[in-house]
Image (tube, helix red, strand yellow):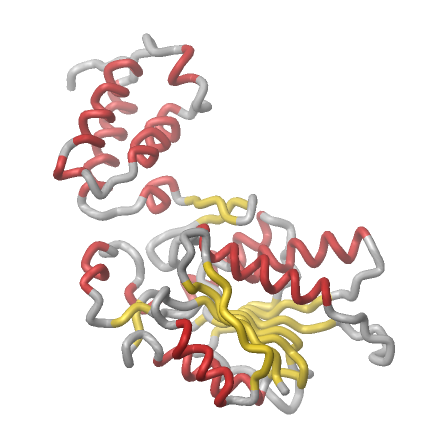
């Protein structure tokens, strides 16, 4: 294999980014992949353009580019993805955390911080449920923030429960909880609420979920060949899992508790109606960074 310097690889990356066949590849994926391979900071690409990649580095770089061109996301090559300023291990068993999901975190934290503190519950911890946790990014990010708030003030303590049907995903989520120092999250294998008791355990104060919501007939699914399809799409125009979560939520949520769900850009109206039909009030939808409907919230009446 022909030797190559950083400068030459940068030119190659620019050519790939400009090529029609690679137009779906974000250029930063290629640059970030190069940095991952050579184990250097981004400044290295400017200060050391004459650095010559070893044969193994060059082979790894080109192999990764080929995989990305075939549809493998960068995060699956590096095995990690940043979310909410935390680092998460990801693999083919988990959905890759998206920036728009941080809207969900922000809205839940805003609601928790704005609610009046209880004075009649013997200091019992509040309870939060994350349905379909995947990599654990939602549960772990929330637990991390709530832990920090509890340590820094007299804020109520929170017990976080996260469920997923996939045992492989739960293994990743448990690892991520340990790495991000919130290892006290309770992880349960369950199809949504199925394994959760409504008799032996207190109800939840917050239920949050980023369920599958892409229409099974959506043509864009063909591009998402690497991620688990079960974490992406759902029947009934993508609404089947959302319907189940909303309809069953009143059995698991305290009166006044919050339900917050991420959904597709064109599902806001349908999801709001589902909330209203199932005893939720103050129902509203929050838009993502691109101005699209993304998260609907309401509290149980």
**Residue 114, quarter of picture:** bottom right
Give residue 109's position: percent from left, percent from top: 64, 61
Task: Please tell me which residue lies in front, 291 or 105.
Answer: 291
Q: How many marks?
A: 0
Across and down, in percent, residue 80 comes to 43, 44
Query: Where the N terminus falls, by quadrant?
Result: top left
Judge whether residue 163 can be spotted in this image.
no
Q: Residue at x 39, y 11 (%)?
A: 48
In this rendered view, identify the residue nearer to me: 217 or 92: 217
Answer with the quarter of the image where residue 159 lies.
bottom right
Rendered-image quadrant of the C terminus: bottom right
Q: Is residue 210 above or below residue 81?
A: below
| Residue found 57% across the figure and 74% down from its top | 207
User: Where does residue 63 sit, x and y in percent of width and height?
Assistant: 22, 34
Q: Nearer the viewer, residue 124 or 283?
A: 283
| Residue 49 appears in the rendering | yes
Determine the residue positioned at 16% across, 16% down. Answer: 2
154 horizontally vs 143: left or right: right
Q: 20 above or below 81?
A: above
- Residue depicted at 47% across the width and 57% down the height: 101
């Amino acid at each position: 294999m022909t030797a190559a310097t950083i400068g030459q690889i940068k030119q190659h990356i620019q050519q790939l980014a400009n090529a029609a066949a690679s137009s779906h590849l974000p250029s930063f994926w290629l640059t970030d992949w190069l940095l991952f391979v050579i184990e250097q900071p981004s400044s290295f690409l400017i200060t050391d353009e004459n650095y010559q990649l070893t044969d193994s580095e060059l082979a790894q770089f080109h192999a990764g580019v080929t995989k990305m061109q075939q549809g493998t996301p960068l995060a699956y090559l590096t095995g990690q993805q940043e979310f909410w300023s935390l680092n998460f291990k990801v693999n083919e068993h988990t959905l890759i955390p998206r920036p728009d999901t941080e809207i969900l975190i922000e809205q839940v934290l805003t609601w928790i911080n704005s609610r009046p503190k209880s004075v009649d519950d013997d200091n019992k911890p509040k309870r939060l449920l994350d349905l379909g946790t995947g990599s654990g990014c939602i549960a772990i990010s929330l637990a991390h923030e709530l832990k920090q708030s509890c340590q820094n003030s007299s804020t109520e303590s929170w017990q976080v429960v996260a469920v997923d049907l996939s045992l492989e995903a739960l293994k990743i989520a448990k690892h991520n909880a340990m790495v991000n120092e919130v290892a006290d999250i309770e992880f349960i294998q369950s199809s949504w609420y199925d394994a959760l008791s409504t008799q032996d355990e207190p109800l939840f104060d917050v239920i949050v979920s980023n369920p599958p919501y892409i229409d099974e007939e959506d043509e864009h699914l063909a591009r998402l060949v690497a991620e688990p399809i079960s974490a992406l799409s759902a029947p009934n125009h993508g609404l089947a899992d959302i319907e189940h979560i909303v309809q069953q939520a009143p059995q698991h949520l305290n009166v006044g508790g919050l339900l917050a769900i991420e959904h597709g850009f064109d599902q806001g109206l349908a999801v709001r109606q589902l909330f209203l039909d199932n005893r939720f009030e103050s129902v509203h939808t929050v838009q993502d960074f691109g101005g699209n409907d993304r998260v609907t919230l309401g509290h149980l009446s």
